[in-house]
Structures are given as structure tokens and as C-alpha cells.
């Protein structure tokens, strides 16, 4: 099962090192970025899941309307792209609720899927899942089962969808990012900087031998013309801008070589009664 997802945020919305929410002053590139992706999906009659930032829904509603009009599955990627574990329960609830409402009001239907910025639901803040269930989310796609700069849930075990059961009995379906386990290390290859970094032949090889693949792309992953965020550290700059000139061609090849479904459609294909339950 291969799932295709996008996190809809602009190039300036992601700076966990020096958070600066004065976003209105930056050059807007999200319209062209989304359009380019939508075209590739339409050509192949693919439906994807788009985790949209509430701030984008507020400031650039046409982007979200356009995605929804094309029949894609729309999810939530928080309001202001803050790491979930930097917020307390109330802060997380307020931010998520605000984003959910903005997006739902735009598309005229309720949304059921969530992905935290930077995969920031970890062993330390599983309480966030409880709030997601309270707010009406059915699926979470925030788990990154490997070490990660910001998130990471290395105790997740086998990378495939699982039912998460919280201490108070509340359940939510988890669709984690996948990885390739080689010797003692887990290699993520299905999105972001990892997808841009590895050569396509290796990504294809790993993807072929993965029964479950969860991709995650951003418009900025395919935009060599984006301005550079100067305040990022050297290592973060490398991770943010490596492979930009070839990534869109790699993306097109991936779409040609594999079949993909949205999270919503993947959910229908899974036999949840016989799926692993992970007690948290
Ligand atoms: Zn993001």
C-alpha cells in the first residue's frame, strides 16, 4: 500500500530554529507550487491527502478550495506550524481547533486527518492524540518511527498502520511515515529532504521492497527558485535545500512507477479488526 500526502505550507512557514510569525511580508509561492502538484495528480487520476496549514486557509483560501474542488482528501497540519511538544495541552487544542474550523468552513465539510508539524507527536506528548480524538479526528499521520530533528517515535515498532490505544481507552488510527531498516539504522526516503537527498534508483529500490509507503511532500521540495531562509543553521540549510533542482523529476518518476491512494482511501482498504493495537 502506497499513500500519497502533501503538507500545504509555504517556504517561509517552516522555521523551528528561529520562529518568526511575521509571515505576511514574504513572497507567496504556494499557488504555483500547489497547481504544479495538482496537475501531476490529475494527469494520472490520483487522489491524495493534503494536510493544510490553518494559516494558509485563512490567508490564501483559494489554495485550499482548489485542492478540495479537485476531489482530494483535505486534512489539518495545525494553524501556525508550531511543534506540538512546544505547546501545552490548551495551546495545542486552541491551535488545532482554530485550524480545523478555518479549513472546514472553507470546504464545507468536516475533516478527519491530522499531521503535526515536524512529526512532533512523540513518546513525550501522546496527550496530543487525546485532544485530536476530542476534536473529531479519526486518523493521525504524525508518527515518524526513527530519530528525527524535531519529532520521532522510535518505539513504534513495525512501520505500518496501527490502532493507537491511549491509557483512558480512547483510540485513533495511526498512519506512520515508513522507513527502511538496514542493519541497525532506519532510513526514511519517502518525503522531504530525504527524498531530495537519495538518488531515484535507490528510492525506487527501497520503495519496491516496502509493503507500506507513506510519502510526504511540500511545494518547497520542488521549488529551486524559493528564497533561502538566511537564519537557518548550516545543517538545516543543507537539509532544506539539497536536491531541489532534480526533485520534481524524481517525483514524476515515482508517480509513474507506483500506484498511490489517499489516507481516506487507504483507510477503506485496511482490515482494522485485524490490525495491530499499540497501547500507549
Ligand atoms: Zn509542515
Image (tube, grey):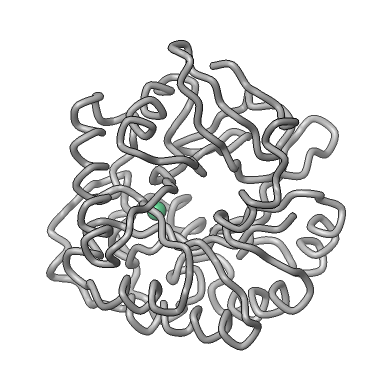
Pick whichever, 214 or 64, lies toward us. Answer: 64
Q: Is residue 101 above or below residue 250?
A: above
**Residue 76 spot, x, y in % from top left:** 36, 52
Q: Is residue 2 left or right of residue 152?
A: right
**Depth order, front residue of 12/72:** 72
Q: Is residue 25 above or below residue 211?
A: below
| Residue at screen point 70% across, 53% down | 213
* Image position, residue 1 (x, y; %): 74, 54
Q: Is residue 69 left or right of residue 149?
A: left
Give x and y (percent) for residue 265.
61, 58
Horizontal arrangement in the rendering, residue 203 relative to residue 109 (left or right):
right
**Quadrant assignment, res 256:** bottom right
Q: Residue at x 39, y 46 (%)?
A: 117
- Determine whether 196 is above or below 144 in the image: below
Quarter occupied by the C terminus = top right
Residue visible at 71% across and 37% down in the picture = 159
Q: Position of residue 66 (x, y in %)?
A: 35, 79
Q: With 188 as the anchor, is 29 left or right in this view?
A: left
Residue at the location (16% across, 53% down)?
21
Amino acid at each position: 500500500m502506497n499513500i500519497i500526502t502533501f503538507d500545504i505550507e509555504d517556504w517561509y512557514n517552516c522555521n523551528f530554529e528561529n520562529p518568526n510569525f511575521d509571515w505576511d511580508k514574504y513572497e507567496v509561492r504556494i499557488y504555483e507550487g500547489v497547481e504544479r502538484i495538482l496537475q501531476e495528480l490529475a494527469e494520472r487520476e490520483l487522489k491524495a491527502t493534503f494536510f493544510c496549514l490553518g494559516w494558509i486557509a485563512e490567508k490564501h483560501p483559494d489554495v485550499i478550495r482548489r485542492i478540495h474542488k479537485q476531489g482530494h482528501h483535505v486534512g489539518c497540519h495545525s494553524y501556525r506550524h508550531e511543534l506540538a511538544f512546544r505547546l501545552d495541552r490548551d495551546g495545542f487544542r486552541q491551535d488545532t481547533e482554530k485550524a480545523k474550523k478555518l479549513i472546514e468552513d472553507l470546504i464545507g465539510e468536516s475533516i478527519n486527518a491530522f499531521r503535526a508539524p515536524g512529526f512532533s507527536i512523540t513518546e513525550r506528548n501522546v496527550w496530543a492524540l487525546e485532544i485530536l480524538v476530542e476534536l473529531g479526528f479519526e486518523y493521525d499521520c504524525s508518527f515518524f518511527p526513527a530519530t528525527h530533528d524535531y519529532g520521532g517515535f522510535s518505539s513504534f515498532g513495525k512501520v505500518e498502520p496501527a490502532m493507537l490505544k491511549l491509557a483512558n481507552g480512547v483510540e485513533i488510527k495511526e498512519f506512520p511515515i515508513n522507513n527502511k531498516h538496514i542493519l541497525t539504522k532506519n532510513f526514511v526516503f519517502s518525503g522531504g529532504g530525504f527524498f531530495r537527498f537519495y538518488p531515484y534508483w535507490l528510492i525506487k529500490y527501497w520503495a519496491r521492497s516496502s509493503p507500506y509507503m507513506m510519502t510526504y511532500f511540500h511545494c518547497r521540495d520542488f521549488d529551486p527558485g524559493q528564497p533561502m531562509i538566511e537564519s537557518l543553521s548550516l545543517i538545516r540549510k543543507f537539509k532544506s535545500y539539497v536536491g531541489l533542482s532534480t526533485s520534481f523529476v524524481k517525483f514524476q518518476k515515482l508517480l509513474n512507477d507506483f500506484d498511490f491512494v489517499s489516507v481516506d482511501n487507504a483507510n477503506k482498504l485496511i482490515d482494522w479488526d485485524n490490525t495491530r493495537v499499540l497501547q500507549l
